[in-house]
Image (cartoon, rainbow, N blue to C red):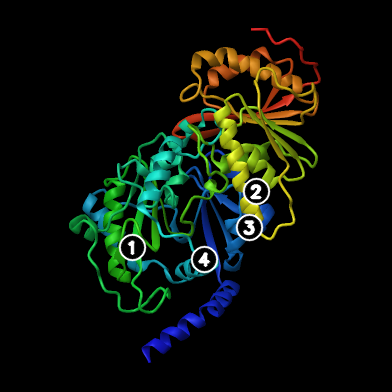
Amino acid sequence: MPSQNLFMSHQSKKLISVTLGAELSAVIGATVPTGFEQTAADEVQEKLGSASRISKDRGKIYFEVPAQSLPQVHRLRSVDNLFVVVQEFKDYQFKENKEDALKDLEDLVKKLPWTDPMKVWELNNSLKKKKTKRKKHNLQSTASREKLNADGEEGGTDQQEASKQEDCAQNAAGVEPAGGQDTEEPQGVASRNGEEEEEDNEQSYTKEELQAGSGSETKAGEGKTGEGDAKVLKFRVTCNRAGDKHSFTSNEAARDFGGAVQEHFQWKADMTNFDVEVLLNIHNNEVVVGIALTEESLHRRNITHFGPTTLRSTLAYGMLRLCDPQPTDIIVDPMCGTGAIPIEGATEWPSCYHIAGDNNPQAVKRAANNICSLLKKNENKESTSLGIPLDIIQWDICNLPLRTGSVDIIVSDMPFGKRIGSKKKNWDLYPACLMEMGRICTPGTGRAVLLTQDKKCFAKALSRMGHIWRRGQTVWVNVGGLHAAVYLLKRTWERAEEKRSFW
């Protein structure tokens, strides 16, 4: 009989999922590249019809959708990680005494409305394709690559420095990301890319894991989560804390909160092969408890071949959206690195024509490999498309083989002068780049969106090029822990000089 009941529960799971999706609504939290919160909110409004609230904790937005819209939520281009909100406290009063504060967090677990968020988590699991189990060698290979790239800065320029950004925050405690890097950067961490206030982002431990090292097996007789009546779910808690008025560390909060979660659900603690990731996000007096819906950050969607610097696809999307591409626009990334920007552009704006180039033959090769990977992925889908509107070439940024005034938009991640190039070289490179970009860009209507951390050098170069470039919007972003800026420039009507020696 028990086996029959189990069979019935599996058979009816899809029907239950459909019913749940039709009736449930969910408050979704999304971590986004810091500085592009409004861009993400605009995309959510445009594609899902939902208004978003931008969190005080930079790098996060919240919006409500019917649970049946989860597939569309996962297709958003501007978000890194997703979680369903269990409950949010906008003004949580922490006790001054550490023990009392941690005891309150423990007691909170029993009072939280877990039922609907867990249904959303189950529905999310039934909708997403089964991912391969997290494997340590995958973690190490991608994690080691992404430690270089950490933020996924894939611009071939200096973005990698930026790469440290999110994942670094997550590993700040010196704990291995346990499935975080290649499988999924624990969402919460990605949210706050580099606050200057005191913060700590750590993988959490349950009390049992701290004592026993691996978490002893606890039996959870009832399949409370609906993931199979006989299965004991494995979980971990990830705590991200920012603020200087807390008496506890994020590790202590995760440990005690995790212990209470384990006791409440009778789940088994597992830092690596977990089924459920519970998020405890603490930003000053704002506390959000959530359940992760993504195992792997969505920003890794396009890139298979990483360079020394790798721009996040989500950041690339934000930069492209900033320049408002129109059908038939010609969009150029003259320093494309591994191709994150043009690949994202060709994917999301297929009615434009994208050209990518770099002076480094190795970068061009990596970008070409990434384009091939994308084409293969598209072949596997039922797509009528025969290709993507993107070409790549090796060239000299200061002498581009493009006609004067032939380009509508330039989007590029410029060398920061750390991993690629040097600050000294930037003093010559930046003005030369801006001059050549001004030459190829259409006077009056052309625009450029450029990312750099070398703000002083860029400002100086821009002041010299004021006759051909006017600064529009500036978006301050955190790239791998570095405070960088994305500049939107408008091309003036002035003709650019053909000569290239000018500094």
Q: Sort mark 3 into few (<14), some (14-19) or many (20+) by Cα contacts within 10 Å.
A: few
Q: CA distance from mark 1 to mark 4?
A: 25 Å
Q: What secondary structure is found at the residue carrying circle 2?
A: helix
For residue 108, which numbered disc appears in the image?
A: 1
Residue 497 coordinates in the image, percent (x, y): 76, 12
Q: CA distance from mark 2 to mark 3?
A: 9 Å
Q: Residue at x 64, y 41 (%)?
A: 343
Q: Which three-letter amino acid code belongs to the residue tagged 4?
A: Asn
Q: CA distance from mark 3 to mark 1?
A: 46 Å
Q: Sort mark 2 into few (<14), some (14-19) or many (20+) by Cα contacts within 10 Å.
A: some
For residue 380, which numbered disc appears in the image?
A: 3
Q: Of the residues tagged 4 and 3, which is closer to the observer?
A: 3
Q: What secondary structure is found at the residue carrying circle 4?
A: helix
Judged from this view, the residue extending furthest toward the top is 502
Q: CA distance from mark 4 to mark 2?
A: 27 Å
Q: Which residue is mark 4?
A: 124
Count of numbered circles in the view: 4
Q: Residue at x 39, y 36 (%)?
A: 197
Residue 445 coordinates in the image, percent (x, y): 79, 29
Q: Which residue is mark 2?
A: 375
Q: Of the residues tagged 1 and 2, which is closer to the observer?
A: 2
* Label 3 with label 1: CB-CB less than 8 Å: no
